[in-house]
Image (cartoon, helix red, strand yellow):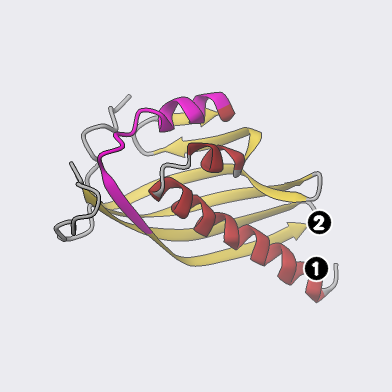
Amino acid sequence: MNPLDVLLIEHACAKLTVRYANCLDTFDDEGVVGLFAPDGVWHHTSQGAMRGHDVIRAFLATRPRTTLVRHVATNSEVTVIDEASARGRSYWTAFLAADYQPGQLAPIGPPFSIGEYADEYVCLDGRWVIASRTMKHLFGQSPSWWQNK
């Protein structure tokens, strides 16, 4: 691989983290699901391992649409392994306002959660996707609708 190939892979994989946060925050469940490989695994802090699009989609559907959440995705670092695989690490900081009223300013407080992701990426049919995303919750607490397994 030449340096440009490496740079393009790094960018494509880092962009997955930003897109993931944006889709979560706008309740674009299909957008989140589409970022994962068909057999991709989301190792969730409270849900455990969720494998495959149907399982991830089912979990996302449980999120209350009256909650305003904004994720700040940072420190994305991608290591290219080869032309079809890479791994990465990034951090999230998430703010939450329960019972949000659209059009009104939400109250602000400290972040409800801060953590890091460890990711594995694969290239399928020329498109980079998440093969595995592992959450590690570092600060805060889980919202009540994250029913622990």
> Magenta segment, which residues?
54-71
Relative vertical location of residue 96 with respect to residue 73 in this rendering, above or below: above
Residue 31 locus on image (x, y percent): 55, 43
Q: Answer yes or no: do the residues labelled 2 and 1 have beta carbons within 8 Å?
A: yes
Mark 2, secondary structure of its residue = loop
Is 98 left or right of 147, judged from the image as shown?
A: left
Q: Nearer the viewer, residue 88 or 146?
A: 146
Numbered badge on residue 100: none
Mark 1, secondary structure of its residue = helix
Is 9 left or right of 101, judged from the image as shown?
A: right
Is 94 left or right of 81, judged from the image as shown?
A: left
Seen at 66% across and 47% down, the residue is 129
Seen at 71% across and 61% down, the residue is 80
Q: Nearer the viewer, residue 117 or 8?
A: 8
Residue that label 1 marks: 5
Amino acid type for the residue under numbered disc 2 = Glu
Residue that label 2 marks: 83
CA separation in Å, label 2 and label 1: 8 Å
Q: Is residue 55 one of those drawn in magenta?
A: yes
Seen at 52% across and 44% down, the residue is 133
Residue 47 locus on image (x, y percent): 38, 30
Residue 13 locus on image (x, y percent): 63, 58
Q: Nearer the viewer, residue 3 or 12?
A: 12
